[in-house]
Image (cartoon, rainbow, N blue to C red):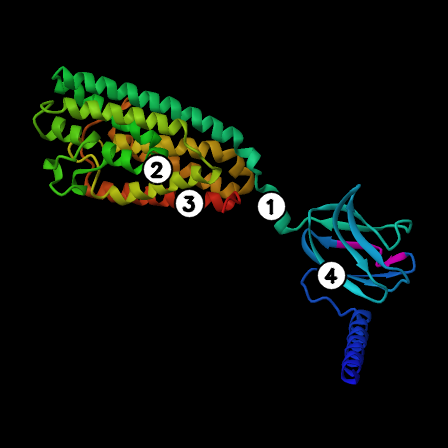
Amino acid sequence: MRVAVAASAMLVAAGLAAFWWASGVARKAPPPTAENAVTVTIRGNVCDPSDITVPAGRTTFTIVNQSQRALEWEILDGVMVVEERENIAPGFSQTMTAKLHPGDYAITCGLLSNPRGRLHVTPSAASDAEAARPSLVAYVGALAEYRVFLALEADTLHDAAQALADAIRAGNAQQARPLYVAAHQAYKRIEPMAELFADLDTRLNARAEYFEKREADPAFAGFHRIEHGLFAGNGTAGLAPVAGQLLADIGQLQERLRGLNIPPERLAGSAAKLLQRTADNLPAGEDRYSHADASNLQGTLDGTRKIADLLAPLLTKAAPALQQAIAQQFDALGKALDPWRDGEEFKPIPVDGAQRQALAAQVRALAGELGKVNAALGLE
């Protein structure tokens, strides 16, 4: 019994000692160590200081209660509580960190009947950058318009592939060759999203070198199988089933694109990824039989520029220099294709090695700039 009483007495003494030590620490109200830090002391019915100015962003407040009553301390935006600390006992302090936007706020100073202090939050570099970043709601229009673009271009692709298939079934290779170029360019315009479906992209657009037996491999199909037959093989012979499967796969692609979830960050991200892959492929070439590299590149530029144009109003506000650089590089690449233009179409002439390297460097630079867009818009 005596042991229990003694142990209880020791626990009480230890508790009192801890309370005394904590009270002393609280009464001292140690100076703040955070970069943006403010100590507010409540004395009587006033805050000291009662008029505070801090930069926008995160600020750590240390609230010291030197009144005779337990209190709560609040930052108010009109009638809305922004941040608060409750039950600060007399002689104690509490800290809180608040992320504040530019504006004028009120602060409570003890009892609710006491006069309120004022908190002024001034703009900062961080708040300016954050304000420039659009909210997710701001992407609704761009995403909706891009969905319409995808649907219309997918319809164009289907119509072009249908015309190509009809010419192949009719055995008219001369008519089918320019129709192939037009259909493949149409695919390039939607490729930023079409290539997300690996199975369809393989069937539609895989080149011969990705198959064990190259052009002779039975799995080699899609655009490049048709291209090989029309430009380097036996014309339309044996291509009717390939063209039929191409149409069926494009039909599946249309269905999948209609149901595709496109978060805002996928727009610029997919465009940058496609342009980087295009730059990597340009030195060797993709349409090696038809020499339609310039036409293909125009399709890629059309599809990726549509994305860039939809994001331009948001990017102009968030990062105007980046937006200007992207627009200028798209213009420069379009001009670089002028030697191959023939009205609205392109001449079926090869792009030589030096020209390929030069175009690849420009496309790679554009991919790099588009790769910065998501960070500039606060999407990563």
Disc 1 to disc 3: CB gap under 8 Å: no
Earlier in the chain: of badge 2 and badge 1, it is: 1
Q: Amino acid at mark 4?
A: Thr
Dot 1: few (<14), some (14–19), or many (≥20) neighbours within 10 Å? some
Q: Amino acid at mark 2?
A: Leu
Query: 90 or 19: nearer the eye?
Result: 19
Dot 2: few (<14), some (14–19), or many (≥20) neighbours within 10 Å? few
Q: Secondary structure at mark 4?
A: strand
Mark 2 highlights which residue?
A: 196
Earlier in the chain: of badge 1 and badge 3, it is: 1
Earlier in the chain: of badge 2 and badge 4, it is: 4
Magenta stretch in the rendered image: 46-53
Task: Give the mark toward the camera: 4 or 3.
Answer: 4
Q: Amino acid at mark 3?
A: Gly
Alpha carbon distance from label 4 to label 3: 41 Å
Mark 3 highlights which residue?
A: 371
x and y percent of residue 378 in the render?
Answer: 53, 45
Alpha carbon distance from label 2 to label 4: 49 Å
Q: Image quadrant for the N terminus?
A: bottom right
Mark 4 highlights which residue?
A: 95
Alpha carbon distance from label 2 to label 3: 17 Å
Query: 334 or 144: nearer the eye?
Result: 144
Residue 51: say if magenta.
Answer: yes
Disc 2 to disc 4: CB gap under 8 Å: no
Alpha carbon distance from label 1 to label 4: 25 Å
Q: Residue at x 38, y 22 (%)?
A: 152
State the count of labels. 4
Q: Residue at x 89, y 53 (%)?
A: 111
Mark 1 highlights which residue?
A: 130
